Image (spheres, rainbow, N blue to C red):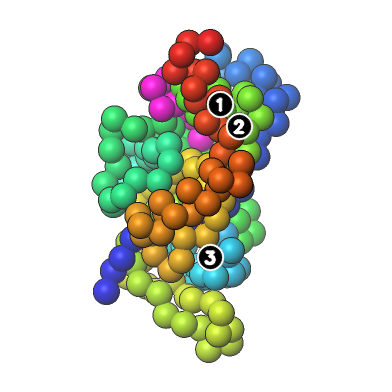
């Protein structure tokens, strides 16, 4: 049965890259990085077969990227639908570099996009999270790994601040527990402070 599958990769952008990118793109912030990786067990224990990831990347590129509607959200949504009120960025190009699916991302001037831009400028370490529908099966070669099956359908790529794993599938209840634990450990302090400053206009 298809369920929502969410996976995270670090997406690091340095201050020098931000300044250079904005100069080269008439003030727009355009960043580039790895969106997803094929044939490699990620920190969630899942493996995306290259054939399946290439198929979905091509479908997403043809159906969304080329039509300038490859939008993503800031933080994890709880559904398979992209919420326009929370859109922060748009992917303008995707291609494979070996097993890495690399993307060029334009940060939009939407409310969520403005927060995302300021987080990058403040040096906050963020991640890119693929969101899709599909099923997984345990791998015979590695009991701790699950292979994404051929029914997988790529939906979007979102920027997230939470690098922790979310189990096999996104679960709002577990998500809340993970977030509360990270707040108590102080890992969210910098993010929350930056967002507060942006909302207060400081």
Range of the magenta residues?
A: 105-113
Q: Which residue is mark 1?
A: 193
Residue at 47% in and 75% down: 147
The disc placed on residue 190 is 2
The image shows residue 116 at horizontal and vertical percentages of: 50, 29
Judged from the image, the secondary structure of the residue bearing numbered disc 1 is helix
Residue that carries the numbered disc 3 in the rendered image: 44
- Tell me if residue 32 can be seen: no
Figure quadrant of residue 88: top left
Q: Using the image as rendered, state which of residue 140 and residue 105 is in the foreground.
A: 140
In this rendering, the answer to whether 22 lies above or below 76 is: above
Q: Secondary structure at mark 2?
A: helix
Give the quadrant of residue 125: top right
> Where residue 195 sits: x, y (%)?
50, 25
Is tag 2's residue or tag 3's residue first in the polypeptide sequence? 3
Q: Is residue 91 visible?
A: yes
Q: Position of residue 37 (x, y in %)?
A: 57, 59
| Mark 1 Cα shell of 10 Å, populated few (<14), some (14-19), many (≥20) | few
The Cα–Cα distance between marks 1 and 2, rounded to whole angstroms, is 5 Å
Closer to the chain start, of discs 1 and 3, is 3
> Which residue corresponds to the image point at 44% horizontal and 18% vertical from the top-left?
199
């Amino acid at each position: 049965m298809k369920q929502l599958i969410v996976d995270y990769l670090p997406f690091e952008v340095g201050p020098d890259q931000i300044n250079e990118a904005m100069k080269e793109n008439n003030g727009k912030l355009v960043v580039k990085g790895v969106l997803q990786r094929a044939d490699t067990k990620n920190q969630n224990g899942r493996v995306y077969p290259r054939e399946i990831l290439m198929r979905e990347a091509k479908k997403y590129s043809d159906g969304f990227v080329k039509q300038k509607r490859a939008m993503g959200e800031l933080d994890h949504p709880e559904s398979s639908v992209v919420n326009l009120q929370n859109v922060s960025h748009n992917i303008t190009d995707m291609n494979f570099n070996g097993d890495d699916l690399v993307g060029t991302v334009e940060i939009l001037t939407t409310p969520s996009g403005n927060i995302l831009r300021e987080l990058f400028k403040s040096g906050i370490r963020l991640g890119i999270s693929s969101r899709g529908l599909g099923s997984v099966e345990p791998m015979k070669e590695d009991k701790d790994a699950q292979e994404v099956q051929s029914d997988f359908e790529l939906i979007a790529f979102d920027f997230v601040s939470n690098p922790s794993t979310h189990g096999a599938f996104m679960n709002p209840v577990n998500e809340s527990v993970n977030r509360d634990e990270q707040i108590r450990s102080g890992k969210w302090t910098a993010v929350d402070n930056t967002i507060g400053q942006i909302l207060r206009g400081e």
